[in-house]
Structures are given as C-alpha cells and as structure tokens.
Image (cartoon, rainbow, N blue to C red):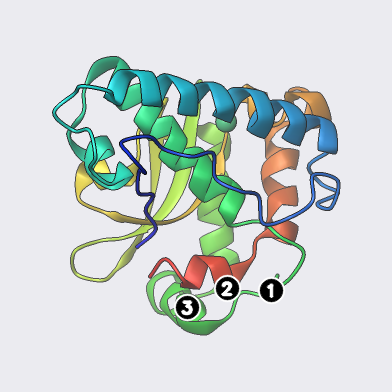
Amino acid sequence: MYDLHPTNGQFAMPTLPFAADALGVISAKTIEFHYGKHLKAYVDNLNKLITGSELAGKPLSEVVSHAEGGLFNNAGQVLNHSMYFDQFGTENHDCCGEIADMIIRDFGSFDTFKREFEQKGTSLFGSGWVWLSKDSDGKLTITQEPNAWNPIRRGLQPLLTFDVWEHAYYLDYQNRRADYIAALWSIVDWKAVNARL
Ligand code: MN
C-alpha cells in the first residue's frame, strides 16, 4: 500500500516522477501551481499542525485515518496529491499486470470501468476526488470523496485517483472537467498503480 513516512516528525514534499513539461495533457504551468503551490501549502500546514499532536511520528495513512479538523484536511490533501502525482508518467500507459486482471474481473471490461470512473468524476459536485480502491474482500470499487477525503477513511485501500478540484484543471481546461478527466488516461503509469496493490 502507498504511504509516506515522516523524518523527525516532518513530511517531505514528494518528488515528481516526471519533468514538469513532460505530460502534455497537464501543462507545466498547472504543475507549477498545483504541485509547487497547492501541494506545498498542504505539506507546510500538515507539518505545522502535526507538531506536538498525538499523531506526530505516525505514517501519513494513520494520520489520515484518525485525524480531525485542519490536521485531517491537510494530511488528506497531502496523501491524495502525493498519490495523484506519483501515478503519472511517460511510460506504462497500457493497463497491465494484476490490476488489469482485477478490472476485467470486477467491471467486465476496461471500457466499462473507465466509463463508470469518468461518470463519477464528472458528476461529483464541488471539490473532491474520484478513486479506484480495493475493499476488504479484495474487490475493486469506485468512490467519490469530497474535499480532502480519502477512501482509507472507509476501510478501503486506495489505488488510483483523479483530482477534480478546479485548481487541477482550470488553467488548461477551464470549466471542461470531463475533457480533463478523459485526457488523464493517456498519462497514467499502470506500473505505479500495480505497486499500490
Ligand atoms: Mn489538487
């Protein structure tokens, strides 16, 4: 399972597995703001709020599972964005490996899965995230999570996510959230997704 661990109680900015101008369907300008400003602010706020809290020193997944209020919001956004950026790249764009078999098993086909994921991402009202996760029986499920929520709050294991907050797409796609969502499939690195199983 994907997780981040603090050093001396503080979380580092995750590194990007791609160059800022390498993705094409997400511009370098969006990466500059989304990663460099939005995520940086969440990491800084998390590190301020975790200091002296009873969750200090715990892995990020545990903080997200148990925190409330501002600590939860910032921890959730750090985990969500770290997983979002970590799953994109310039290679492995064909769905493959164990996750591909699970998608066929639980959705019937990759296209059916894609349609449901896109529909849930497009119809989520306001700010939030659409997720593919694995439940405690090992079955895949797609959920809409508002604001900073992450599926681990419901006992699910998160595998893949598209950020549908406006800041994720407004510079490149303005109000066309569906176009942004459809474009993201071309940059998913399925090897990174498999590593989260
Ligand atoms: Mn975001």
Left or right: residue 181 compared with residue 22: left
Q: Is residue 113 above or below residue 103?
A: above
**Residue at the disc numbered 2:** 191
- Which amino acid type corresponds to the residue marked 3 in the rendered image? Ile
The answer to whether marks 2 and 1 mark residues whose Cβ atoms lie closer than 8 Å is yes
Quarter holding the N terminus is: bottom left
Where does the image place residue 110, in percent across and percent down from the top left?
57, 71
Q: Decide which of tag 2 and tag 1 comes sooner along the chain.
A: 1
Q: Are marks 1 and 3 in contact (CB under 8 Å)?
A: no
Foreground tag (2 vs 3): 2
Residue linked to disc 3: 104
Dot placed on the residue nearer the N-terminal end, 1 or 3: 1
Ligand 1's image quarter is: top right
- Answer whether residue 165 is visible to the viewer in this image: no
Earlier-in-chain disc, 2 versus 3: 3
Q: Amino acid at mark 1?
A: Asn
Q: CA distance from mark 1 to mark 3?
A: 18 Å
Q: Which residue is mark 1?
A: 92
* Residue closest to the eye, 126 or 119: 126
